[in-house]
Amino acid sequence: MTHINKEKKNLCSFDKSFSAEIFFNKPSKYRDLERLSNYKGKLISEGSNLSYAPLSFEKESLSVNLKNFNRIINFDFKEKEITVEAGITLAELLNFTLKHNLWLPQLPGYPLITLGGAVATNAHGKSCQSHGTIRNAIKNILIFHNKNGWLNLSENENKEIFDLTIGGIGLTGSIINITLKLEEIKSKNFITKKIKVSSAENCIKNLEIISEKKNSFIYSWNMADNLQEFGKGFIFENTIDENSYDKNEIKIPNLKDMNYLKSKVTIWNNFSIKLANKMFFILNNIKKNEKKENFLNVIFPFYGKEFYFDFFGKKGFLESQILISSKNIQSFFDEFKFLFKTYKPNISLFSFKNMSGEQKYLRFEDNKICLTFDYINNKKNLLFMNKIDSLCEKYQAIPSIIKDSRLSKETIEKCYPEFKKFKDLINAYDKSRVYRSEISQRLEI
Ligand SMILES: Cc1cc2nc3c(=O)[nH]c(=O)nc-3n(C[C@H](O)[C@H](O)[C@H](O)COP(=O)(O)OP(=O)(O)OC[C@H]3O[C@@H](n4cnc5c(N)ncnc54)[C@H](O)[C@@H]3O)c2cc1C
């Protein structure tokens, strides 16, 4: 039997809620990947392991890290198409395409995320109302599955596996390369406008009006540290400043690792969250309503602000991202606020954006409003979040499995109409169910 090189390491999900000692392997040649055909155990692909939830590892699985596969294979400027290996980071990809005034607007918010990870989670960016998710930019995918071999995937070839792979959390095998449809970017400078909102209801109303605009990156920041001011905050709108001139070529930093998980001290608590919110609100209230911003600040808002995650300390945090229809949002919030009174959860981040797209399988995508909440990881907040799961089931909302590490199979079954179909198709395609992660085990896929 061919020997598979395995090393041991400790891995932790980005929210720090799950850790395990795992075996990993970092192939650098296609024939190293092919050797995995002889591997008898379970596997899962890994990018930068920047997922909030434990998606790219599991105690019993061998994590196959694909970051050595980061080359640009083909670039067609005329057709605006690029084929790249899946381990390329968003920083590496943009540092090449931006030189040609091309990019893809559906980028998730951190430069070290790999393209393979973004495709496997069907990631989205701030402009998900006008540009949808990364699915819209994918033309072709090449995967390697240790039992099914090499497969070319597109709308015209192996369409069913193509569909299962986008947002398929790595369960169809390793994505090796991806052909993307790029878009022209007229400038790398942005203009940011902001509008003050007085409540969650007021924010939803204003978002609906502004989000009609094409090519805008629209999201909000709202307070959730007390009920009286719940939802008070600002809507931010970033638009590309087409009239500006790019003085210098921009270089997106491509660090080896994210500067995170260093702090052992917990800063976020009820008092510090209130104080930070007050200060952020006051600062934004006195600043001008329009300003110029650079590419890095707008597209990768957490770059340089990693301390926000560190401030949760050793126990980390929990994020809940929920898609809900405009028809149900008011009733959802009425009950949310009622529960808030009882549980008094510690919410450090609350935000809205609108999304467009088609919900299918386990993809976090729909024509709905996207809510994001970050919680301190403690008992009280976990109880509150469990109650919110019931609201999601009641109001046909979709909680993100990519962001929220604690979601149960029962909730996902009730909220995702195609959960069973996804599971059946994965089982039919991979009869021995080789590719497994903590999440696939938790959801019993
Ligand atoms: C600061 C920060 C901001 C973020 N902002 C956003 C955002 O704005 N929008 C958004 O949608 N998400 C966002 N995310 C989440 C992030 O986009 C996803 O979790 C993404 O999957 C992380 O990529 P990764 O390379 O770290 O993949 P990993 O976390 O290593 O893996 C994620 C999943 O992809 C699979 N996978 C990875 N590479 C491959 C491959 N080559 N072949 C097959 N499967 C593979 C893994 O098996 C796993 O299931 C953010 C994360 C962070 C830390």
Image (spheres, rainbow, N blue to C red):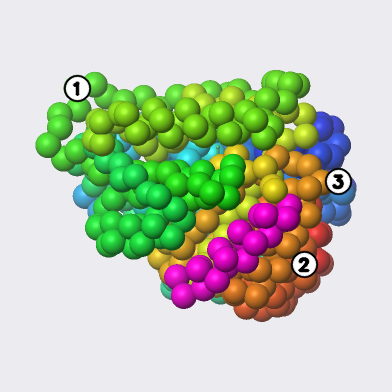
Mark nearer the N terminus (2 vs 1)? 1
* Most frequent secondary structure within the magenta stretch: helix
User: Which residue range is magenta in the image?
Assistant: 326-343
Answer left or right for 299 relative to 244. Answer: right
Answer left or right for 153 relative to 284. Answer: right
Q: Amino acid at mark 1?
A: Lys
Residue holding disc 2? 409
Nearer-the-camera pick, 234 or 373: 234
Circle 1 Cα neighbour tier, 10 Å, few/some/many (<14 / 14–19 / ≥20): few
Looking at the image, residue 177 lies above or below residue 339: above
On whether residue 330 falls in the magenta region, the answer is yes
Label 2 element class: helix
Residue holding disc 3? 59
Mark nearer the N terminus (2 vs 3)? 3
Q: Amino acid at mark 2?
A: Lys
From the top left corner, tell me how far across and down residue 292 is, in percent. Answer: 25, 30
Residue at 41% across, 30% down: 282
Asked whether the viewer can see residue 445, the reply is: no
Alpha-carbon distance for marks 2 and 1? 51 Å
Q: Amino acid at mark 3?
A: Lys
Answer left or right for 227 relative to 389. Answer: left
Circle 3 Cα neighbour tier, 10 Å, few/some/many (<14 / 14–19 / ≥20): some
Residue at 20% across, 27% down: 246
Residue at 16% across, 40% down: 242
